[in-house]
């Protein structure tokens, strides 16, 4: 996830969607919050309006009753209300009929007289005369037309002056009782009392009315429908005065219902909020349903506080907003999709397409296909400028690469020339091999036969890679000692040591002559015999030296008998009179044995001395050797300059150590080229250049690769290297071979699977050898070649 990349269109879509989503969320959230705030404000205003209206309605109703009671208490100036009973009764009935919320109206005086009209459970009129000795309590039951249907008279036991509603009235104040259960109807209600006092503030009469709370509940029900919620009226003692949801106002044991009796934490928590002076907010009921609540105070003239609490479900408030929100989101999404596709088309055509084309231009540059880099067509100025800049950059890179390629090629050719110049005898090898290799590669490229049919150099870069490898195929020779490369005889190191041995023979020749004269002086008469002996000694010395000299040149193969003869001649003694340690360098002195005998000393004519063995100054890194896959046997010593050891080389002129040193040039070639950070188009140079001494059967060096492990270009390089070496006329150790001789040798190598047979056939049939010969071989080397003879083999 850390490194994932996305397309421009995906990025634009994500950006566009993110911005749109962010803006939509912001606007929708703002709309939602503002809508919610507005809804709460409207709800609050609506609640205030309803509760205010409700409060006013209740208070007006109660004030109306208070007004009626004030009239009733002063309806007569007589202290004894019985005297005005008839008119009082009429007024009381009128007042009762005028206000349905009144359950009962009654009037009492200071004498204990009591008059009452009652609505429930049946219309009735009550009269108690406490002045009369009989003190009768008379009940007159009425029908719906207020006509008396029955009378019930009993001894009065009721004294209104002992009742709270009478006693609580003080001065001109109105008395409001706490809600309680009426004895007559067993319904909850309150009693409102108004007193009549004289100028001395003596209570003369008290008028009172029972106000039924169920009437308020009906009023709350009607208002709750408008609010679309719940309403409840309660006081400071948690007594429920009225509700809009038909909750019972009394308990089963005829006690007033408390808020806790409603079994809802909603109302209990509301009362707790009031105690905390929090009159609006959010609450949850026992089902986790959310409500918005408002509380208003309904203050009475008596100083007691009633509370109107309203509740509205939060979901009801947010439902319309959510619906509007969903509708807005759907419309927004629709608009986004309607807008997106045209924008997507425009961006794709005028932005994405040019960007992709610009990307393609950079890819063409990355693949070095500069000819495909052209300005793009676009109406966007910045893209047009960028396109032109890329084209200019492409040309600059192409020019730079060309210059770099020329520079590298010149370095390569300089290196090849340096290697050729290092030896006057191989001055053209590194130059001729590339020409021959390219001729054969071109022929193989056109061939459709065998395994080579699939070979194809289709680009200039592939050809350059091959040419570079051809020029560098012997670059490792730069570290090979010159005397090894140029070695023409077995005893040659930095110079040809045959002269040392010849000098020894000269000394022996002289010694033989001196010995002759010494014997002649002693025996003058034996002159003829001594002359013959001298001639025989001189002849043998000359023959032995000629034999050693021939051994030094090296031939195709040295027989064991010749080696034995060589060792026999080497046993010939001669006297050395000079110290062989004089004039030596420090390094040479270290190799000379310290127990060297004092001169003169008798020595063998040919020797393998300890000091002639050169140890390695720095051992070969075997781990690195294995890492590169080299499989050549490593000789024990760096060099062995022993005279007998060198002269007894059976084939050629190189010792095992020198052969390894010569072959080491390909190791150095591979190591040098592998360590060069070639560009991608030259990555195969090390393999092409480093495998031209391998064979098809794993007998080559340095890696002992088999045919399938050697690329066709490397096999081509091998044939070119061998043919050039066979026909070269500048080798000190051999004569230049003719065309037919060279091709014959190569045919044997082909038969022995040292070289690729398919490529050798192409080499012959295509006439590559002729083209090369015409340019590089001497006229006397070019003879007639019957290629069918070698192809048949």
Image (cartoon, rainbow, N blue to C red):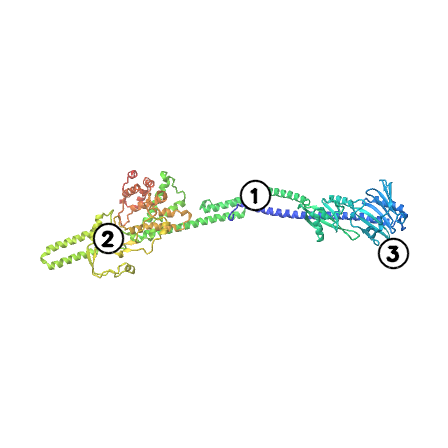
* Front label number (1 vs 2): 2
Separation of disc 1 and disc 3 at Cα? Answer: 97 Å
The numbered dot on residue 655 is: none
Separation of disc 2 and disc 3 at Cα? Answer: 167 Å
Q: Where does residue 39 sit, x and y in percent of width and height?
A: 69, 47
Q: Name the residue under label 1.
A: 344
Pointer 1 local density, CA inside 10 Å: few below 14, some 14–19, many at least 20: some
Q: Are marks 1 and 2 in contact (CB under 8 Å)?
A: no
Residue at figure coordinates x 60%, y 41% from the top left: 338
Question: In the picture provided, is 32 more to the left or to the right than 486?
Answer: right
Q: Name the residue under label 2.
A: 644
Residue 366: in sight, yes or no? yes
Residue 379: in sight, yes or no? no
Earlier in the chain: of badge 1 and badge 2, it is 1
Pointer 3 local density, CA inside 10 Å: few below 14, some 14–19, many at least 20: few
672 or 350: nearer the viewer: 672
Element on which disc 1 rests? helix
In this view, 590 is above or below 712: below
Separation of disc 1 and disc 2 at Cα? Answer: 90 Å
Element on which disc 2 rests? helix
Question: In the picture provided, is 400 more to the left or to the right than 651?
Answer: right
Q: Name the residue under label 3.
A: 200
Q: Do the residues labelled 2 and 3 touch (CB within 8 Å)?
A: no
Q: Where does residue 350 sit, x and y in percent of width and height?
A: 54, 44
634 or 462: nearer the viewer: 634
Q: Where does residue 507 sit, x and y in percent of width and height?
A: 19, 57
Pointer 2 local density, CA inside 10 Å: few below 14, some 14–19, many at least 20: some
Element on which disc 3 rests? loop
């Amino acid at each position: 996830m850390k490194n994932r990349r996305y397309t421009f269109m995906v990025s634009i879509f994500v950006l566009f969607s993110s911005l749109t989503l962010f803006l939509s969320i912001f606007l929708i959230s703002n709309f939602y919050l503002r809508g919610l705030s507005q809804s709460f404000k409207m709800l609050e205003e609506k609640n205030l309006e309803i509760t205010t209206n409700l409060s006013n309605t209740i208070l007006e109703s109660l004030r109306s009753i208070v007004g009626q009671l004030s009239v009733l208490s002063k309806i007569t100036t007589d202290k004894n209300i019985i005297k005005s009973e008839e008119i009082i009764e009429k007024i009381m009935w009128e007042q009762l009929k005028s206000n349905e919320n009144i359950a009962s109206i009654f009037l009492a005086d200071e004498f204990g007289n009591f008059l009452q009209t009652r609505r429930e459970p049946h219309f009735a009129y009550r009269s108690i005369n406490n002045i009369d000795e009989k003190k009768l309590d008379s009940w007159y039951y009425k029908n719906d037309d207020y006509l008396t249907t029955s009378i019930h008279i009993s001894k009065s036991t009721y004294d209104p002056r002992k009742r709270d509603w009478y006693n609580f009235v003080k001065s001109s104040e109105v008395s409001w009782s706490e809600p309680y259960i009426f004895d007559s109807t067993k319904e909850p209600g309150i009693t409102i009392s108004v007193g009549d006092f004289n100028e001395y503030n003596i209570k003369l009469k008290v008028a009172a009315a029972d106000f039924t709370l169920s009437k308020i509940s009906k009023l709350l029900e009607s208002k709750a429908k408008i609010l679309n919620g719940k309403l409840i009226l309660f006081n400071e003692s948690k007594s429920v005065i009225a509700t809009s949801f038909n909750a019972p106002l009394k308990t089963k044991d005829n006690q007033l219902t408390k808020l806790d009796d409603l079994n809802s934490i909603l109302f209990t928590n509301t009362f707790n909020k009031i105690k905390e002076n929090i009159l609006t907010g959010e609450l949850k009921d026992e089902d986790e349903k959310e409500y918005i609540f408002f509380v208003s105070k309904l203050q009475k003239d008596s100083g007691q506080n009633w509370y109107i609490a309203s509740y509205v479900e939060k979901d009801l408030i947010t439902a319309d907003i959510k619906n509007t929100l969903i509708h807005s989101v759907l419309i927004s999404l629709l608009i986004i999709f309607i807008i997106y596709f045209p924008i997507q088309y425009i961006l794709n055509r005028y932005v994405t397409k040019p960007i992709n084309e610009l990307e393609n231009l950079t890819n063409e540059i990355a693949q070095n296909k500069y000819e495909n880099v052209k300005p793009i067509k676009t109406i966007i100025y910045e893209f047009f400028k960028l396109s032109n800049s890329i084209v200019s950059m492409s040309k600059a890179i192409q020019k730079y690469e060309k210059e770099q390629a020329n520079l590298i090629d010149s370095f390569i050719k300089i290196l090849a020339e340096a290697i050729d110049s290092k030896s006057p005898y191989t001055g053209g090898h590194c130059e001729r091999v590339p020409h021959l290799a390219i001729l054969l590669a071109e022929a193989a490229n056109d061939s459709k036969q065998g395994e080579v049919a699939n070979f194809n150099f289709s680009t200039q870069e592939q050809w350059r890679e091959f040419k570079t490898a051809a020029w560098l195929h012997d670059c490792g020779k730069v570290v090979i000692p010159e005397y090894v490369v140029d070695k023409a005889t077995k005893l040659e190191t930095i110079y040809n040591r045959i002269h040392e041995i010849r000098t020894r023979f000269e000394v022996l020749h002289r010694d033989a002559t001196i010995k002759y004269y010494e014997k002649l002086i002693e025996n003058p008469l034996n002159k003829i015999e001594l002359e013959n002996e001298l001639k025989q000694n001189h002849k043998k010395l000359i023959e032995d030296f000629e034999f050693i000299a021939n051994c030094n040149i090296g031939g195709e193969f040295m027989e064991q008998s010749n080696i034995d003869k060589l060792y026999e001649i080497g046993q010939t003694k001669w006297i050395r009179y000079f110290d062989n340690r004089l004039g030596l360098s420090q390094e040479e002195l270290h190799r000379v044995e310290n127990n060297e005998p004092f001169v003169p000393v008798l020595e063998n004519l040919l020797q393998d001395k300890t000091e002639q063995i050169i140890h390695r100054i720095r051992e070969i890194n075997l781990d690195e050797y294995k890492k590169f896959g080299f499989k050549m046997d490593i000789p024990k010593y760096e060099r062995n300059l022993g005279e007998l050891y060198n002269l007894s080389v059976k084939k050629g002129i190189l010792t095992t150590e020198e052969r390894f040193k010569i072959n080491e040039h390909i190791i150095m070639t591979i190591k040098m080229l592998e360590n060069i950070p070639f560009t991608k188009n030259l990555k195969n140079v090390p393999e092409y250049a480093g495998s031209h001494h391998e064979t098809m059967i794993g007998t080559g060096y340095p890696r002992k690769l088999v045919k399938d492990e050697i690329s066709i270009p490397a096999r081509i390089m091998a044939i070119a290297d061998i043919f050039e070496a066979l026909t070269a006329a500048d080798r000190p150790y051999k004569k230049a071979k003719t065309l037919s001789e060279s091709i014959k040798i190569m045919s044997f190598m082909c038969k022995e699977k040292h070289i690729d047979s398919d490529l050798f056939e192409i080499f012959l049939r295509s006439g590559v050898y002729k083209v090369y010969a015409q340019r590089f071989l001497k006229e006397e080397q070019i003879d007639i070649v019957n290629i069918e003879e070698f192809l048949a083999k």
